[in-house]
Image (spheres, grey):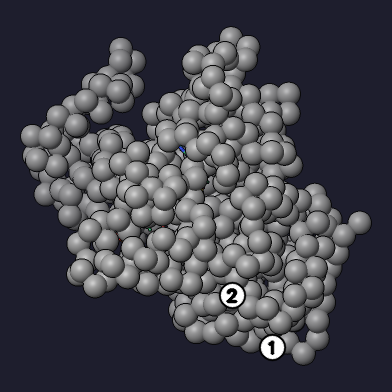
Amino acid sequence: MTSRLVERWQQVTSVDAAKVAIDDDHESVSFETLGARASAVSAALRGRGLEGQRVAMLVTQSSGWVEAFFGTVLSGAVVVPLSPLHPEAEQRWFVENSRSKAIIVSRDLERRVSGYAGDRPVLEIEELRQFPTAHVSPGSDDDTAVILYTSGTTGKPKGALITHANLAELARLVASAWQWSPDDVLLHSLPLHHLHGLGISLFVSLLAGGRTRMIQKFDAPRMWDLMAEATVLMGVPTMHKKLLDALDTAEAADRDRWQKNAGGLRLVTSGSAALPSTVGERWRELTGAYPLERFGMTEIGVGMTNPVSGKRVPGTCGPPLPGMDIRVVREDGDDAAPGEPGEIWIRGPSVFKGYDGQQDVTRRSFTDGWFRSGDTATWTEDGYVKILGRTSVDILKSGGYKLSALEIEEVLREHSAVNDVAVVGVPDETWGEIAVAAVISRAGRESEVEEAPLRQWAKQHIAAYKVPKRVLLFEDFPRNPVGKVIKPELVKLVRRRLETAGY
Ligand code: MLC
Ligand code: AMP
């Protein structure tokens, strides 16, 4: 039986073939053209024997990205999306860790892979899409469609294996709950190497037959202007905050126009991190409705969502998304009553297959078929879920990106002037949370590990968004009797130091 993802792709690219699917900064591409180009990419990849293999892609966010993604999937291969936000060292690691056999690039990014491509073919999407024949592999629901790397409680990110069925069901369930129609126009600027941008935004719109206005990178004034043609805006809380800050500081004429644009939106959603109510209330003033907040995760898709019509409760992520099962489980394993804290456990058709090459970690992440999220939450009396925080102090959420303190520490420890380092998260108005590095220098080398030089050095090894925004020098850290850093104590010291410094 053909995979639901391939089946849906074929329907949507043929039923309303002439309709515009993607508007990017260069062209408007119809569903028919998108479908034909993806089938050409697929044939080209088959011609190179890549079916069944992993294929990395470093393609600018545009219609070409969609063609590369679906071309790879239709060929029977697995996509490993890379981001230009990652330095070469990190991209190399993703390509090697995933054992990718080829790299699809857009011409503007081709130079970025030359240092690590090795003997892997580097294939330009601009060439692949012109391949003279077409091919579509039926695939099957359980095939992996994409590997998304997600930071966790281990040093290195883990590759989440997301199947054809996971993506198709995520798109179907969300489109239905959010009453998506082919007349909707999504304004899209979220990064496509994460599930929010890829699966929750782009594919929901695309597979529902809507139009997607894609811009390469978030830019608040452009977003406000482009909102004039949009009906739906999806963002992380930081994006919403940055949009509102731009509105507040805009010239009067821009502000009037932008406010009018906001009034035309049917739906504003927020996810990936907790939405501050101050930000939500500002959106309510602009659009007449509090943003729809929902909860998601790379491994599970969307778990809970406030309703489109019906009561949206600020500070909650709403009831379970219809089609998904949610439990809040106490430490003793029983289900929590309303008001009692517990861990969110999730089951449903968009829950992933496991972590690539990490069967033990995968096994430990599930209990009786339920994925354990690592988020602490509680039910409200109305059956809505309120998030209380993460169970691990080493997982941070900054501007919607999940950051692993351990991963960042591992990188910073490689610096020869760093004697020891501990990374902690502290609250921040714009980013939700920022990473701060507490560093113990090797004797006499303090100047090398000050904020500016250490941050600059770190950017060669990890994405700039993972690099701690503040670096503080310490003589030692609070430790327990066996020498382990007591992070909650360190957080207090860090916050005090930052407050004293006026941060
Ligand atoms: C950018 N920077 C960040 C950052 N984003 N630092 C910490 N956290 C972030 N999220 C850094 C830049 O590298 C730069 O560093 C400086 O901050 C200023 O960058 P900018 O260009 O002004 O940032 P901007 O482009 O405005 O980016 C903000 C943003 C972006 C909110 C648009 O962070 C973003 O796209 N976030 C979305 C993340 C996301 O999609 N998460 C979904 C995960 S999936 P320097 O040093 O150069 O000055 C998931 C599931 C679910 O969570 O439920 O959705
Ligand atoms: P990621 O691993 O990047 O997919 O991030 C998933 C995590 O984002 C979840 O486990 C939560 O911690 C967090 N998250 C997602 N949506 C929300 C939300 N609406 N409120 C609070 N946290 C959220």
| Image quadrant assignment for residue 410 | top left
Residue that sits furthest to the right in the current view: 1
Task: For marks 2 and 1, give the CA distance.
Answer: 18 Å
Question: Which residue is rendered at x = 60% and y = 70% of the image?
Answer: 211
| Image quadrant assignment for residue 500 | top left
Which labelled disc corresponds to residue 266? none
**Percent of width and height locating residue 303:** 61, 38
Q: Earlier in the sequence, mark 2 or mark 1?
A: 2
SS for dot 1 = loop
Question: Which residue is rendered at x = 22% and y = 52% of the image?
Answer: 454
Asked if residue 401 is positioned above or below residue 82 in the image, the reply reads: above
- Left or right of 289: which side holds 435? left
- Name the residue type under label 2: Ile
The residue wearing badge 2 is 22
**Percent of width and height locating residue 326:** 64, 29
The residue wearing badge 1 is 130
**Percent of width and height locating residue 397:** 40, 41
